[in-house]
Amino acid sequence: MGMGRKAALEISSSGSGEVDMKFIDEAVIEVRAGKGGPGARHFRREKFVPLGGPDGGNGGRGGSVILRADPNVHTLLDFKFQAVWEARNGEAGQGSRKDGRAGEDVVIKLPVGTQVFAFDLENKESGELVVDLDADGREFVLAKGGRGGKGNAFFKTSTNQAPEHSQPGEEGEAGAFQLSLKLVADVGLVGFPNAGKSTLISRISAARPKIADYPFTTLVPNLGVVQAKGGRHFVVADIPGLIEGASEGRGLGIRFLKHVERTKIIAHLLDLAQLTETGEEADLEVLFDTINRELRNFSDEVAAREQIVVLTKVDAVSSQERVEEFRRRFASRGLAVHVISSVTGAGIPELIDLLANRVFLAH
């Protein structure tokens, strides 16, 4: 990952701490490539040459609509305000064999991780995947401009010295498409609301998400770049809205579950100080299995991804026996377990090293 990607993520993730309600990860657009310019029917005036000789130039090609993944773009908000994108038509050919100027291309800059699907405007349904812009700088011609028509000079032959005809330009391609953003991150932080995801990402990166003691503080995914030893760095995404029934639309539903699909590692945060509705200490294994059931209902591939269990808020627990009990229970299931406090910083450097090692082993 280059320095440009790193810097862009830090800028997009930092701020005043207010929730950015302008995060948009779905949009529908219409695109129209430019029409090719018509060829010219023209004869030059030259003595002793029949009809002066054909010298009509060719029309210019129409402009294309090109997509480009840009690390400085972080949301699809702009496409809520500009739903139609049109490239310019090619210019007509002229006499003296002058070809028309090509129409200017339109380059649409999209966030890295945007998927583009064909879209049926009449039935409001998305179709097959057209392209996945999953890497910085990747480009794709979404709608190709029409070819310019040939001028009459093109059709001159030994038996047809004065062709009268020229070609019109071809129409450019057009269509409707659905844009769907899936964040590109190395580590996805999952867990119930208030498990400490936002606090952790603010502790290990430049991200400054809103943090409070009520559910769904985080209403949009947060990205942060984490510096590790040896000059390594990786990207962490805080995935909000997971509760029981999320895959069926409860809470924030499945809207943000797709953002965990590209991650290499899942860090599953569990609050050691969490209580049940009756005020009793929560069984963290039950919470762990509940979230994983939602991940599995959403995608078997996501559910099968490597997970690291992160037991948070150890500073708020008076009994170390409770900590060790859950450490043993998760370790017995073959899971890597790490205990941290984002408030005191306990275990944070070790967690960063662990995540970095796993991320770079997964490359």
Image (cartoon, grey):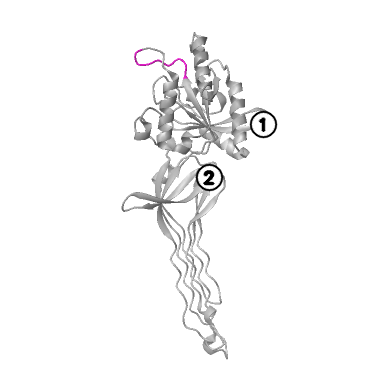
Which residue type does callout 1 highlight? Gly
Judging by the rendered image, the residue that carries numbered circle 1 is 231
Q: Going by the picture, which residue comes out furthest to the front?
A: 332
Query: Magenta stretch: residue 211 in it?
Result: no
Q: Residues within 10 Å of mark 2 (few under 14, many from 20)?
A: some
Residue 258 position, x and y percent, is: 44, 38
Which residue type does callout 2 highlight? Asp
Residue 281 position, x and y percent, is: 41, 13
Residue 355 position, x and y percent, is: 58, 28
Quarter of the image holding residue 76? top left
- Asked if residue 233 shows in the view, the reply is yes
The one of 39 and 236 positioned closer to us in this rendering: 236
Q: Is residue 326 above or below residue 86?
A: above
Q: Which mark is residue 124?
A: none
Q: Secondary structure at mark 2?
A: loop
The one of 52 and 211 positioned closer to us in this rendering: 211
**CA distance separating discs 2 and 1:** 24 Å
Q: Main secondary structure of the magenta part?
A: loop
Residue found 51% across the figure and 39% down from its top: 262
Residue 56 position, x and y percent, is: 52, 77
Residue found 38% across the figure and 12% down from its top: 280
Q: Going by the picture, which residue comes out furthest to the top?
A: 318
Q: Is residue 120 above or below residue 114?
A: below
Quarter of the image holding residue 180? top left
Judging by the rendered image, the residue that carries numbered circle 2 is 134
Query: Magenta stretch: residue 275 in it?
Result: yes
What quarter of the picture does the N terminus occupy?
top right
Quarter of the image holding residue 21? top left
Q: Is residue 2 left or right of residue 296?
A: right
Q: Is residue 17 above or below residue 78?
A: above
Residue found 62% across the figure and 26% down from its top: 353
Q: Which residues are magenta?
A: 271-278
